[in-house]
Amino acid sequence: MWGYIGRRILATIPVLLIVALLVFLMLRFTPGDPAAVIAGDSATSADVAEIRAKLGLDRSVVTQFVIWFGNVLQGDFGESFFYKKTVASLISDRLEPTLALAVLTIVLATVIAVPLGTLAAYRQGSWIDRAVMGLSVMGFSVPAFVVGYVLILVFSLQFGWFPVQGYQRLSEGVWGFLHRLLLPSFTLAIVFIALLARMTRTSVLEVLNEDYVRTARAKGLPNLKVLVFHALRNAAVPIVTVIGIGIATLLGGVVVTESVFNIPGLGRLTVDAVLARDYPTVQAVILLFSFTYVLINLVIDLLYTVLDPRIRY
């Protein structure tokens, strides 16, 4: 087990190196000059050249990458061109909103989707099954930003139940924290619920036809106990896989959702940094997202051994 974990951790090093190189090159060859953005419209060519030299952008691309990646290996992600703060402090300030949004989204999606998918499998062919599958298709079809604006229109502007935008930190009060986060979390969870409900239904349907499920029913066990302890438990491996994939998709979804609801998280920081050509910030955030994705995959693989004792590494 520990050998497997060590190999997986070592395997992340070349992955992160390739991601860092690709992101670095894409930013450097994308049209737009950070120095020109910082200098403003009234700046002269000499002003722009001076800013480029100060930021180190007048050096060759290879030299810039070697210096930047060498600093990253020492834990130094540089200073933001736009915010004039260290990138590490920027990320630490914006981490809580994104983490809170992601965790609440996963909890909401799992609590809603797994029971719906299990019920649809148990009532296969009924109106409940067709309703769950129809809602799943709708969840896939409607973009997250459309769902967000519709929810704001209905529940914020029409009924006034939730604030339109903004974020309150957990340290300032639990109720305000949840009140402001519930609507964006549900917006982000829609696609996740659709994906997870369909996968849960498919997995549980396969298990319901197994001999051990028929044996449990023949022994007279209640249907709920059969579904939870025999069917759902043995269908957990593909469900957990989808949850892991869903967490990875959240990394992209938070960018749109945080922009719609004006949440000061990493997604919003990424958008602002891209628009400002803030190279160090964009590079650090994408590296963080990539490392998180790799780490989640490792955790999901390790969970397989807990859910299914037959799986060993």
Image (cartoon, rainbow, N blue to C red):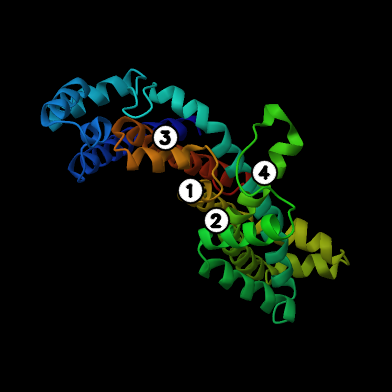
| Foreground tag (2 vs 3) | 3
Q: Please report contact status of discs 3 and 4: CB closer than 8 Å, yes or no.
A: no
Q: Using the rendered image of the protein, determine whether residue 308 is visible from the camera's viewpoint.
A: no
CA–CA distance between discs 3 and 1? Answer: 12 Å
CA–CA distance between discs 1 and 4? Answer: 23 Å
| Foreground tag (2 vs 1) | 1
**For marks 2 and 3 on the same chain, the one whose residue lies earlier in the sequence:** 2
CA–CA distance between discs 2 and 4? Answer: 27 Å
Q: Position of residue 16 (x, y in %)?
A: 33, 36
Q: Position of residue 61 (x, y in %)?
A: 14, 32
Q: Which mark is residue 248?
A: 1
Q: Give amino acid for label 3.
A: Leu
Q: Which mark is residue 288?
A: 3
Q: Position of residue 180 (x, y in %)?
A: 67, 43
Residue located at (37% from left, 19% from top): 75
CA–CA distance between discs 3 and 4? Answer: 25 Å
Judging from the image, what secondary structure is the residue with disc 2 in?
Answer: helix
Q: Is residue 24 above or below residue 140?
A: above
